[in-house]
């Protein structure tokens, strides 16, 4: 469970107002890595050939990922405005990795801060040395 910080408002982990975990995270952007949302072999979307053709790409190793688009490097299946109102256009067919992120879990908290949806927690004050 996330520790409460009384200096900040309690985050509202409402996925339809967010979409942060559908965007490439900072650690990937820093190295220009865009293989964020993998479509694994067992994912049901693999059987949807039209969706696969439209929404995914195959890397040099033969792995399949969702395409990322725009300045936010967001999954191309995401519609709406990040941090306001979003929706997954393939919700029933979304890959397993998308289902594993839970509102309020460690990854959710991190990417929400990265996308500016929640403020970053203040730096802890340095401990004073005893004289
Ligand atoms: S799981 Fe978290 S980061 Fe992902 S959409 Fe929901 S609230 Fe946002
Ligand atoms: S498939 Fe849907 S849930 Fe998964 S990253 Fe894309 S928009 Fe988000």
Image (cartoon, rainbow, N blue to C red):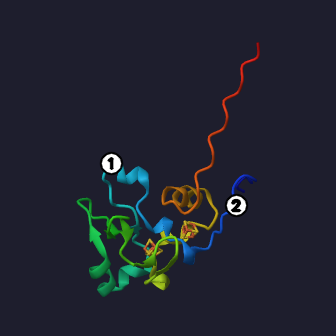
Q: Quadrant of residue 129?
A: top right
Q: Are marks 1 and 2 in contact (CB under 8 Å)?
A: no
The picture places residue 106, in percent across and down from the top left corner, at 60, 56
Q: Nearer the viewer, residue 52 or 117?
A: 117
Q: Residue at x 66, y 38 (%)?
A: 124
Picture layout, residue 88 above or below residue 11: below
Q: Is residue 7 above or below residue 39?
A: above
Taking the view exactly as shown, the residue that stands out farthest to the left is 60
Determine whether the residue tagged by mark 1 lies in a helix, strand or loop.
Answer: loop
* For residue 40, above or below residue 92: above
Is 14 situated left or right of 7 in this image?
left
* Residue 9: assigned label: 2
Looking at the image, is mark 1 or mark 2 earlier in the sequence?
A: 2
Rendered residue at 62%/67% (across/down):
103
The reply to whether the residue tagged 1 has its Cβ within 8 angstroms of ligand 2 is no
Q: Quadrant of residue 46?
A: bottom left
* Residue of label 1: 31
Label 1, label 2: how far apart the Cα atoms are: 33 Å
The quadrant of the rendering that contains the C terminus is top right
Residue plotted at (65% across, 69% down): 12
Mark 2: give few (<14), some (14-19) or many (20+) Cα within 10 Å: few
């Amino acid at each position: 469970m996330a520790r409460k910080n009384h200096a900040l408002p309690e985050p509202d982990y409402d996925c339809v107002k967010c979409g942060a975990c559908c965007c490439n995270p900072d650690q990937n952007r820093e190295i220009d890595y865009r293989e964020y949302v993998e479509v694994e072999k067992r994912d049901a979307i693999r059987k949807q050939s039209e969706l696969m053709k439209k929404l995914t790409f195959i890397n040099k190793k033969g792995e399949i990922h969702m395409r990322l688009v725009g300045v936010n490097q967001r999954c191309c299946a995401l519609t709406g405005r990040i941090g306001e109102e979003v929706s997954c256009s393939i919700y029933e067919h979304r890959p397993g990795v998308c289902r594993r992120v839970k509102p309020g879990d460690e990854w959710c908290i991190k990417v929400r801060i990265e996308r500016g949806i929640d403020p970053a927690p203040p730096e802890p004050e340095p401990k004073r040395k005893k004289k």
